[in-house]
Amino acid sequence: DESSMRVVEIESTHVPREELQIATEKIEELQEENKILKAWKEKALNWIDKNVEKMKQISFFQYVGGIQKRNKRQDQEMER
C-alpha cells in the first residue's frame, strides 16, 4: 500500500538495492504463505464447527440413551 511504499522509498536511500530486492521477495513469499495458512485455518475452523455439532448431537443421544437404560434397570429392580 501507499504507506509501505513511502517507507521503502525512504529506506532505499540507506539500503543497498540487492538487500531491498531480497527483502521484497521474502515479503512476497511470506504473504503467499500467509494466504495459504489463512485458507487452511478457515477450512479447519469450518470442519471443527461442523463436527463439534455432530459430536454434541451424538453425546446428547448417548446421554439420553444412558438415562433410558438406567430407568429400565430401575424398573426391573422394582419389579423384583
Image (cartoon, helix red, strand yellow):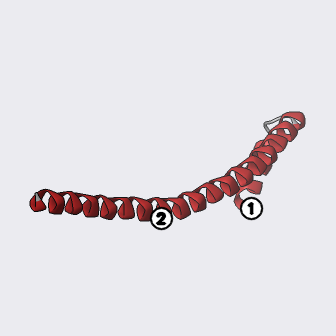
Please state the horizontal and vertical placement of residue 18, each as a whole percent of the image: 89, 35
Report which quarter residue 35 is drawn in.
Answer: bottom right
- Hey, what amino acid is under mark 1? Asp
Q: Which residue is mark 2?
A: 53
Structural distance between the alpha carbons of marks 2 and 1? 41 Å
How many C-alpha atoms fall within 10 Å of the one at disc 2: few (<14), some, or many (≥20)?
Answer: few
Query: What residue is drawn where x is 76% and y is 43%?
Result: 11
- Hey, what amino acid is under mark 2? Glu
Please state the horizontal and vertical placement of residue 68, each as a whole percent of the image: 27, 64
Please state the horizontal and vertical placement of residue 17, each as a whole percent of the image: 89, 38
Element type at mark 1 = loop
Dot label at residue 57: none
Relative height, residue 23 to residue 70 (above, below): above
In this view, the residue in front, 37 or 62, is 62
Query: What residue is drawn where x is 85% and y is 37%?
Result: 22
Q: Which residue is mark 1?
A: 1
Image quadrant where one finds the N terminus: bottom right
Going from N to C along the chain, the mark reached first, 2 or 1, is: 1
Image quadrant where one finds the C terminus: bottom left
Q: Are marks 2 and 1 in contact (CB under 8 Å)?
A: no
Report which quarter residue 78 is drawn in.
Answer: bottom left
Query: What residue is drawn where x is 29% and y is 58%?
Result: 66
Element type at mark 2 = helix
Q: How many marks?
A: 2
Judged left or right of residue 46, residue 24 is right
Query: What residue is drawn where x is 31% and y is 64%?
Result: 64
In this view, the residue in front, 42 or 51, is 51
Please state the horizontal and vertical placement of residue 53, each as a whole percent of the image: 47, 64
In this view, the residue in front, 76 or 67, is 76
How many C-alpha atoms fall within 10 Å of the one at disc 1: few (<14), some, or many (≥20)?
Answer: few
* Farthest residue, direction front: 80
